């Protein structure tokens, strides 16, 4: 049977503040009560109130502004993803890398119908730019950078903030993976990226799904072989 977790006073205040925000229907930019007012409302010390506010800052729910105090944040997942990225960077389990590749493939494949529908000239130009950079790169590090920027631009073409933030999270952790398992496929990878660009340009969903499946599955298999080999030692 799982042990019952006892909440600290700071956690209780943070939860009450969330309830207050919901009950009052506060919107981005609206101000929270002052520290002194919150001390009276909850009957707690100033230090406890400050710690609860810091916790909500880290979660991205509120921000503290000079001369205004604590206000409700605009919608932004950056702080949440920054914290999660830091936690993921500490992971050493190699199986996690394979799960990361599965997550990346699932996200990008799911984005393809939206990309075909919404991609504009600006994003097509960016894809072509990163493609040219990949063809002219002179090192593995350069190629890796332009490869990731190419794929990030693909997801940006959905114009969906949630999907874009999720892709950023995956690619921050993906950098660590790429350092451990650099892509070895060279010209094959370049030709696949060119085919992806051409399918986006012609808005050919069937062809785009086909080449993306091949492209993302091949790297997964490369990493899986190396992970399996590492388990033997």
Image (spheres, helix red, strand yellow):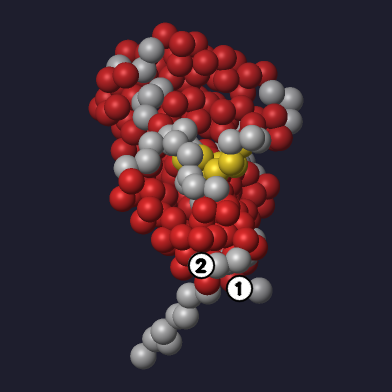
Q: Relative to residue 109, is residue 173 depicted above or below?
A: below
**Whether label 1 touches label 2, CB < 8 Å:** no
Residue 31 visible? The answer is: yes
Q: Nearer the viewer, mark 1 or mark 2?
A: 2
Percent from the top left, x then y, of residue 125?
Answer: 49, 11
Percent from the top left, x then y, of residue 16?
Answer: 41, 61
Instruction: State left or right for residue 186 relative to residue 159.
Output: right
Q: Residues within 10 Å of mark 2 (few under 14, many from 20)?
A: few
Q: How many marks?
A: 2
Residue 170 visible? The answer is: no
Q: Relative to residue 47, is residue 34 depicted above or below?
A: above
Residue at x 38%, y 12% (from the top left corner): 120
Instruction: State left or right for residue 218 relative to residue 184.
Output: left
* Closer to the camera in the image, 56 or 50: 50
* Closer to the camera in the image, 219 or 42: 42
Disc number at residue 232? 1
Q: Relative to residue 29, is residue 174 depicted above or below?
A: below
**Residue 50 falls in which quadrant of the image?**
bottom right
Disc number at residue 43? 2
Instruction: State left or right for residue 83 relative to residue 140.
Output: left
Q: Secondary structure at mark 2?
A: loop
Percent from the top left, x then y, of residue 75?
Answer: 43, 36
Percent from the top left, x then y, of residue 184?
Answer: 61, 41
Sequence-earlier tag: 1 or 2: 2
Q: Secondary structure at mark 1?
A: loop
């Amino acid at each position: 049977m799982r042990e019952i977790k006892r909440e600290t006073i700071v956690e209780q205040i943070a939860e009450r503040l969330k309830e207050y925000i919901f009950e009052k229907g506060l919107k981005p930019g609206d101000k929270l009560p002052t520290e002194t007012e919150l001390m009276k409302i909850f009957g707690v010390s100033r230090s406890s109130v400050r710690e609860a506010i810091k916790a909500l800052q880290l979660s991205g729910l509120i921000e503290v502004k000079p001369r205004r105090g604590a206000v409700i944040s605009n919608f932004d997942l950056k702080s949440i993803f920054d914290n999660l990225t830091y936690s993921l960077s500490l992971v050493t389990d190699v199986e996690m890398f394979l799960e990361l590749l599965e997550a990346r493939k699932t996200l990008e494949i799911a984005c393809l119908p939206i990309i075909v529908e919404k991609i504009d000239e600006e994003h097509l130009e960016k894809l072509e730019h990163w493609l040219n950079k990949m063809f002219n790169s002179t090192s593995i590090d350069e190629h890796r950078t332009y490869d990731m920027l190419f794929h990030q631009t693909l997801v940006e073409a959905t114009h969906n903030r949630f999907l874009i933030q999720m892709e950023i999270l995956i690619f921050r952790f993906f950098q660590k993976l790429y350092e451990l398992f650099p892509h070895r496929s060279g010209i094959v990878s370049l030709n696949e990226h060119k085919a992806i660009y051409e399918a986006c340009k012609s808005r050919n969903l069937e062809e785009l799904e086909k080449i993306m499946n091949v492209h993302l599955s091949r790297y997964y298999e490369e990493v899986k072989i190396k992970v399996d080999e590492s388990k033997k030692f």
